Image: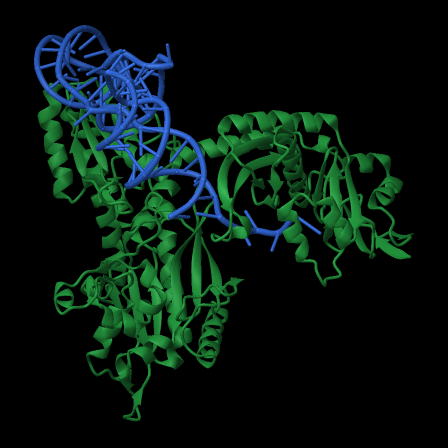
Amino acid sequence: MLVLTLPDGATREVAYGTLPRDVVGSIGPRLLLAAIAVAVDGEIQDLMTPLRKGGAFQVLTDKDPRALAVLRHSGAHILATAVRRLRPEAAIGFGPAIDDGFYYDFQVAKPFTPEDLEQIEAEMRKVVAEKYPFVRAEVSQKEAKQVFSDDPLKLERLEDFEGSDEIISTYTDGPFTDLCRGPHVPDTSYLKHFKLLSAAGAYWRGDEKRQMLQRIYATAFFKKEELEARLFQMEEAKKRDHRVLGKQLDLFQFFPHAPGAAFWTPKGTQLWNTLEAFIRERQREDFLEIKTPLLYTKKLWEQSGHWGKYKDNMFLVWDKEEAEQGSSPEESLSMSLKPMNCPSHHLYFHADKHSYRELPKRFVTFDVLHRNEISGALSGLTRVRQFSQDDCHVYLREDQIAGEVKFLMDFILSYYDTFGLTARLKFATRPEQRIGSDELWDRAENALRAALESTGRPYEMKEGDGAFYGPKIDFDVMDSIGRAWQLGTIQLDYNAPERFDLEYTGEDNAAHRPVVIHRAVSGSFERFLAILIEHFAGAFPVWLAPEQVRILPISDDVSGYAKEVTAKFRAAGLRAVCDDRSDTLNYRIRDGEIMKVPYMAVLGKREMETGQVAIRVRGAGKKQEIVSVDAFLARLFEETRTRALTPSSEGAAS
RNA sequence: GCCGACGUAGCUCAGAUGGUAGAGCACCCGAUUUGUAAUCGGGCGGUCGCGAGUUCGAUCCUCGCCGUCGGCUCCA
């Protein structure tokens, strides 16, 4: 007998193997109608899987977020059911629920077209209407092989069970049977609000050496409004897309002549420079900025380990002299554009004798870096081949690690704070591909973790996700589309000091190895700007806005005055533009709103006489403020100086 | 890199079973001098991504290339 404890504290004894639906039904028939699945000691199972252990028994209805994953997983089966009806020859891969929906992978002769998706979606609605129960069966390995004898992908999956005592189960909804551990909703009619979203290729088992399957992505919800909200949100996200806004606001462009490398327009360059000036200012006190070469001989990369581990991602450069000395074409590619700044910094640190008193020593560099990303990975400003980092390397004594990590964390978090961004911390440990001994890794991981814990901030673990030279703390920031971007990073490195023979002279007058910390705040300027564009929906706070104020004379009579006012703002260091085009005021205001200029100042005869301006705040409509020119100037100046998050980007998103 | 979709004027997009293309906006000119999200009229503007093939004829069909976009385990 199994003992189940209900949420109200009551207990029930049921026989081993009882179906949850019988238990739920005995609690109440209405509850059975609302039940999607149950949780036993927090473990989700469906209503048709026999109970094998007792514990806290909870019924999940559509209000429970855990039930949504069950619905979506069933959605994947319904998708496969429909595809199998339309294309009986399709072999079926995996079809899990994912964070915001579900997908299913198929092996088909012809990839799916958008029209196919419509047809499949219509077929799914039929399957839903036919209301097939999900029937669970538990089978032996041999029986399973029988059932899936014509499906090579499932047979391969079955091999994983060889020698395992895991229960093999199948689920059948009408004509379709899938190898599946569940859980599932009771029948296909539960899938009411769903939409197929896209089709794309996906390697079988994520392995690029294996065949490519065709994946269909979809999403589903219990409530119609939730599905509609999701689709609306996807539309809104498109409008905020930095690639769309970058064009609309004239910030940057790409040319086929330089894939993965952006051209920054005058406005975009202004934005970039503002950001760079900001971080320079922040780093003025405690950091030393240096500029280093972009191109190096392979000797440096051999020393750093990049030549062995990272060569595929580097842009190699042909050396004429090497070729003339008879080296092969391959060997003559003996130089490389730098993909990272670290080796340059180490080289420079190594060049001088350092006292323990100088440490920690922090070098920062904003140079251009190149990484040869595969063409399919390129995407807007977020995945590029040429970019710049606010890259810092700290050289310090081992006893300074805790203090330095705290210093850097505070620095990074307060930086994000300026933009109204919040970050989550992740601690990443040694990856499979790495350099350095296990002892060194033990020391590095322990030291970094201790430093992280001493700050008392919450963090998540990312096992095996460290850099090839050391463990790291990553700072993930969420953007408006809900994507988490890894921006900042603090990486501990015991290997580089060895490879570059770095030393400092200790109090004891003997040579010691320093430790290196790699630190980036923005990740890359390109990607950070992309995130800022999406975060603010292009409606930048006044301190960041390429154009801070647009001054609009109502008629030619006052354009002279408007120009004077503009000059005054510019003399104060503000980015002001006078729009005295002969178009109507309405036209010019519309243009300013579309370009998301934070403030417009309208000048007419009244204002000229009183030395005032009529301010229009971005997104606030015709609600205007009449203030003196000097007061307005002081306000803009102050908002810029304090890097205020004003004016709000509310209402400027569309 | 791989799978798929896409590439028409500066931008957003129409278009023809293969007979060399259109709109709006932007831009230029003229009129209008405007009080808070598009004044009116006129004009300029395209080797229909690039290259080859099929054809009397290709922007449309075929092949190759370039680029952009969606994706390429959140494991039955």
Disc tally is 0
Q: In terms of depth relative to the viewer, which is nearer, A92 or A414?
A: A92
Q: Position of residue A151 (x, y in %)?
A: 65, 44
At x 40%, y 75%, the residue is A401
Toward which corner of the image does residue A423 lie, by quadrant? Answer: bottom left
Q: Quadrant of the N terminus of chain A?
A: bottom right
At x 29%, y 65%, the residue is A392
- Give the side of residue A9 with respect to residue A117, left or right: right
Toward which corner of the image does residue A26 lie, by quadrant? Answer: top right
Q: Position of residue B5 (x, y in %)?
A: 42, 30
At x 40%, y 68%, the residue is A468
Task: Note whether A465 is above or below A211 in the view shown.
Answer: below
Toward which corner of the image does residue A380 lie, by quadrant? Answer: top left
- Tell me the colour chain A is drawn in: green
The structure's colour scheme is: by chain
Q: Position of residue A368 (x, y in %)?
A: 23, 56
- Tell me the colour chain B is drawn in: blue
- Give the side of residue A159 with respect to residue A652, left or right: right
Task: Note whether A286 is above or below B18 in the view shown.
Answer: below
Q: Position of residue A625 (x, y in %)?
A: 29, 29
Instruction: Evaluate whether residue A298 shows in this view.
Output: yes
Q: In terms of depth relative to the viewer, which is nearer, A441 or A419?
A: A441
Instruction: Evaluate whether residue A45 shows in this view.
Output: no
Q: Quadrant of the C terminus of chain A?
A: top left
